[in-house]
Image (spheres, grey):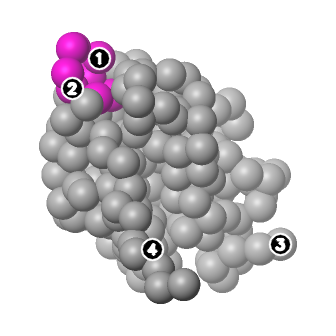
Amino acid sequence: MLGLDAGNEPLCASTMGKSVSKQFAEEVLRSHNEYRRSHQAPPLKLSSKLSREAARYAESLASTRILKHSVESSRGSCGENLAWASYDQPGKDVADRWYDEVKQYSFNNPGFSSGTGHFTAMVWKSTTKLGVGKATASDGSSFVVARYFPAGNVTNKGHFDSNVLPAKTTTATP
């Protein structure tokens, strides 16, 4: 089994402050901010309130073992990314899988697509805070919830153009 956690102990809201879950959240945050930097978006700050809410929802997903987005009304004006794996997934792997959708995103024709929504939520320029929660189900699979404030993927005209910017290309010497 891959992963960073020692054992399969569920991480829930009450343990969010403990080292394993905090390390995981910081790893997800670090990966987000590396990607955001290349897309000219300011770094996110980790929010303990959003992390508590994300952890609570991750626990709920782990208990049902069904991956589905929370009801929008329950998360207020926050965006949400979800991930599931049959093993204990490292934070960087989760962020890398979400970011990988950049390959399908058209910067020439910006807008929302279900195949790129994880990526666009990650690099959405006007988002400032991130919350991260992870929980392990009884079968050892893991559920990760990321909450974003304010939410990205706003479909009003012009929002994608100004919030999802192309990655800066570095000039390589031949």
Q: Are marks 1 and 3 in contact (CB under 8 Å)?
A: no
Asked whether 136 or 80 is in front, the reply is: 80
**If you read the primary sequence from the N terminus, does the residue marked by circle 4 or circle 1 appear first?**
4
Structural distance between the alpha carbons of marks 3 and 4? 19 Å
Query: Element type at marker 2?
Result: helix
Query: Element type at marker 4?
Result: helix
Q: Nearer the viewer, mark 1 or mark 3?
A: 1
The residue indicated by pointer 1 is: 155
**Residue 1, which numbered label?**
3
Q: Which residues are magenta?
A: 153-160
> Which residue is situated farthest in the front direction here?
174
Magenta stretch, main secondary structure class: loop
Give the image location of residue 9, x and y in percent.
Answer: 63, 68
Residue drawn at point x = 23 percent, y = 55 percent: 41
Mark 3: amino acid: Met
The residue indicated by pointer 4 is: 27
Asked whether 62 or 50 is in front, the reply is: 50
**If you read the primary sequence from the N terminus, does the residue marked by circle 3 or circle 4 appear first?**
3
Query: Element type at marker 1?
Result: loop
Crowding at label 2, few (<14), some or many (≥20) Cα neighbours within 10 Å? some
Q: Is residue 52 in sight in this rendering?
A: no
Mark 2: amino acid: His
Structural distance between the alpha carbons of marks 1 and 3? 39 Å
Q: Nearer the viewer, mark 3 or mark 4?
A: 4
